[in-house]
Structure formats: C-alpha cells, structure tokens
Image (cartoon, rainbow, N blue to C red):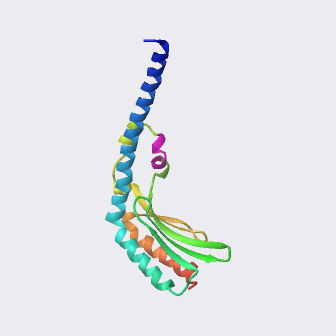
C-alpha cells in the first residue's frame, strides 16, 4: 500500500468514526427531544389548547392582539400585542430546567448524553413578560402558572 493510500485510509477512518459518533448523538438527542414532547402531551397540552381558546375569546375584536401556540418539545403559548412599529408579549412555555446542558448536548460526550434522566421533573413552566416579573413554576403547580399568566393577560393586554 502506497503512502497516498495510507493517508487516504487514515482520513476515511477518522471521518467514519466521527460520523458514527454523530449518528449516536443524534439518536440520543432525538430520544430526549421526543421525551420533551411526551412531557408536553402528558402534562400541559390540553391546558395550553384551552388557554389559547380562552385568550382568543377575550381578544376576538382586537386586531392588534394575537395568540400563538407552539406544541411539542419547545411548547409555548404567546400573546402578542402589536402597536405602531413595536410589540409587547407575554408567554408561558414548557422549559427544561437545565436548559444549558440540554442545548449543549450536540457538543457533549455520548457518555454524558446517555446519563440523561428521563424525568418529568426536568421541566417547569416559565411565565414571562416584558413588563412584570418572570416566574418559574413546577409542573405540579401548573395552575399557579396559569393564574399568573391570566393576571398578566388582564393587566398588560386587556388593561383591566
């Protein structure tokens, strides 16, 4: 085997090893991503749909306010008010508590990704506003999160 053939084989072997590792990471990430979707469906999906209907009901004549629901792993419900060239929004989202570790899984080792614990308690609800305090709620306290979101909706969107 010539030196050129050896160099070619060395490159191909490295590329193959990297591809195998990337494929395994992608499989693990997909499991974690799918688990987030399961947590959404099991814990808050029906509630988010009902909240979307509730808020739409109270803004139906206001063309400046819109409600948007995104489902699954990065589930969130946003209420946005457009005015002039600016906007204001409040939202509730199903969020991973250790967001930094999950978002960096693509750069983590396979061993670290395999250590991920598939627990509903990895997630919480985060209610955010540009005007009032952002708050985080355990899934077991989701009713408090919905009440806080409703309070913000009344104060900031309906001006009640």
Is residue 102 shown in magenta?
yes
Quarter of the image holding residue 143? Answer: bottom left
Identify the image quadrant of the C terminus.
Answer: bottom right
Quarter of the image holding residue 124? Answer: bottom left
* Percent position of residue 20, x then y: 38, 34
User: Closer to the camera, 131 or 83?
Assistant: 83
Q: Which residue does the image show at 33% across and 59% down from the upper left?
A: 38
Q: Which residue does the image show at 58% across and 71% down from the upper left?
A: 132
Quarter of the image holding residue 95? Answer: bottom left
Against 77, is 19 above or below?
A: above
Question: Residue reaching furthest bottom?
Answer: 61
The residues colored magenta run: 101-107
User: Closer to the camera, 132 or 41?
Assistant: 41
Question: Residue reaching furthest left?
Answer: 42
Q: Which residue does the image show at 50% across and 85% down from the upper left?
A: 60
Against 17, is 5 above or below?
A: above
| Magenta stretch: helix, strand or loop mostly | helix
* Percent position of residue 75, x then y: 43, 63
* Percent position of residue 41, x then y: 33, 64
Q: How many labels does the image show?
A: 0
Identify the image quadrant of the N terminus.
Answer: top left
Against 101, is 94 above or below?
A: below
Q: Which residue does the image show at 62% across and 73% down from the upper left?
A: 87
User: Closer to the camera, 15 or 71?
Assistant: 15
Against 124, is 31 above or below?
A: above
Is residue 109 shown in magenta?
no
* Left or right of residue 140: residue 130: right
* Left or right of residue 81: residue 72: left
């Amino acid at each position: 085997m010539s030196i050129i053939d050896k160099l070619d084989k060395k490159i191909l072997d490295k590329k193959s090893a990297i591809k195998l590792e990337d494929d395994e990471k992608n499989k693990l990430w997909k499991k974690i991503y799918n688990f987030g979707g399961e947590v959404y469906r099991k814990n808050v999906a029906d509630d988010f749909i009902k909240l979307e209907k509730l808020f739409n009901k109270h803004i139906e004549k206001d063309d400046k306010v819109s409600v948007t629901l995104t489902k699954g792993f990065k589930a969130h419900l946003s209420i946005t008010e457009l005015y002039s060239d600016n906007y204001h929004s409040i939202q509730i989202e199903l969020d991973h508590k250790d967001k930094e570790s999950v978002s960096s899984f693509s750069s983590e080792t396979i061993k670290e990704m395999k250590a991920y614990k598939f627990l509903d308690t990895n997630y919480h609800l985060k209610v955010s506003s540009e005007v009032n305090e952002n708050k985080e709620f355990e899934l077991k306290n989701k009713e408090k999160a919905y009440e806080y979101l409703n309070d913000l909706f009344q104060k900031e969107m309906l001006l009640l």
